[in-house]
C-alpha cells in the first residue's frame, strides 16, 4: 500500500506544467534542423529530461493519493448506504420543520390573545409639540 503524500493540497502547477513541457519536446523534434546540430541535440535532451522528471513527479504524487482501495461493488454499497442516510436525514429535517412550524403557530396565537394594544401610547403628542 502506498504511503500518504507529503503535500497537503494538490500541486496543480505540477500537472499544469506537463503539457507545455511535452509541447516543447515536440516543437524541438519538429524544427527544420531537427537533431542535426549538437546544440539542437542538447536542447532536445534537456527538454526531454525536464518532461520525464515532471512526469515522474506527477506519477509519484498520483500513486500516493488516498482512495481507490475499494472494489466497485464495495463502492456501490457505500453509495447506497450514504443515500439511505441522506433520505433518513431529510425525513428528520421534515419532521423537525413540521414540529417547529406547529410550535410557532401556537406561540403566535398565545401572544396575540394576551397582547393589549394601547393606541394612545404609540401616537405622538399632537398639541404644540410640547412634551
Image (spheres, rainbow, N blue to C red):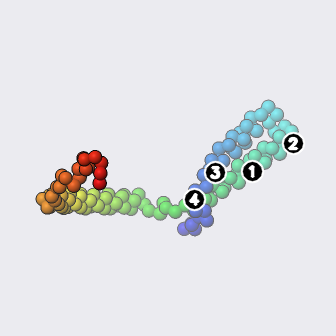
* Comes first in the chain, label 4 or label 1: 4
Q: CA distance from mark 2 to mark 3?
A: 31 Å
| Label 1 residue SS | helix
Verify CB contact (< 8 Å) between mark 2 and mark 3: no
Residue 91 coordinates in the image, percent (x, y): 24, 59
Of residues 91 and 35, the one nearer the viewer is 91
| Label 4 residue SS | loop
Q: Quadrant of the C terminus?
A: bottom left
Mark in front: 4 vs 2? 4
Is residue 31 toward the left or the right of residue 73 in the image?
Answer: right
**To which residue does mark 2 refer?**
38
Residue 78 coordinates in the image, percent (x, y): 36, 61
Q: CA distance from mark 4 to mark 2?
A: 41 Å
Verify CB contact (< 8 Å) between mark 4 and mark 2: no
Residue 24 coordinates in the image, percent (x, y): 72, 41
Residue at the (70%, 45%) spot, across then down: 21
Residue at the (77%, 34%) spot, across then down: 31
**To which residue does mark 3 refer?**
13
Residue 101 coordinates in the image, percent (x, y): 20, 57
Q: CA distance from mark 4 to mark 1?
A: 26 Å
* Comes first in the chain, label 3 or label 1: 3
Q: Quadrant of the N terminus?
A: bottom right
Residue at the (25%, 50%) spot, across then down: 125
Q: Residues within 10 Å of mark 2 (few under 14, many from 20)?
A: few
Verify CB contact (< 8 Å) between mark 3 and mark 1: no
| Label 3 residue SS | helix
Give me the disc on residue 49.
1
- For residue 90, above or below residue 35: below
**To which residue does mark 4 refer?**
9
Q: Is residue 102 visible?
A: no
Residue at the (28%, 46%) spot, across then down: 128
* Comes first in the chain, label 1 or label 2: 2
Amino acid at each position: 500500500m502506498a504511503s500518504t503524500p507529503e503535500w497537503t493540497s494538490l500541486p496543480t502547477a505540477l500537472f499544469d506544467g506537463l503539457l507545455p513541457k511535452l509541447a516543447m519536446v515536440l516543437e524541438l523534434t519538429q524544427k527544420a534542423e531537427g537533431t542535426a546540430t549538437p546544440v539542437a541535440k542538447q536542447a532536445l535532451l534537456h527538454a526531454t529530461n525536464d518532461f520525464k522528471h515532471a512526469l515522474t513527479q506527477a506519477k509519484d504524487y498520483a500513486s500516493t493519493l488516498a482512495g481507490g482501495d475499494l472494489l466497485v461493488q464495495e463502492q456501490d454499497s457505500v453509495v447506497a448506504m450514504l443515500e439511505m442516510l441522506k433520505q433518513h436525514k431529510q425525513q428528520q429535517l421534515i419532521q423537525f420543520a413540521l414540529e417547529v412550524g406547529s410550535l410557532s403557530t401556537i406561540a403566535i396565537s398565545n401572544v396575540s390573545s394576551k397582547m393589549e394594544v394601547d393606541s394612545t401610547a404609540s401616537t405622538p403628542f399632537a398639541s404644540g409639540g410640547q412634551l
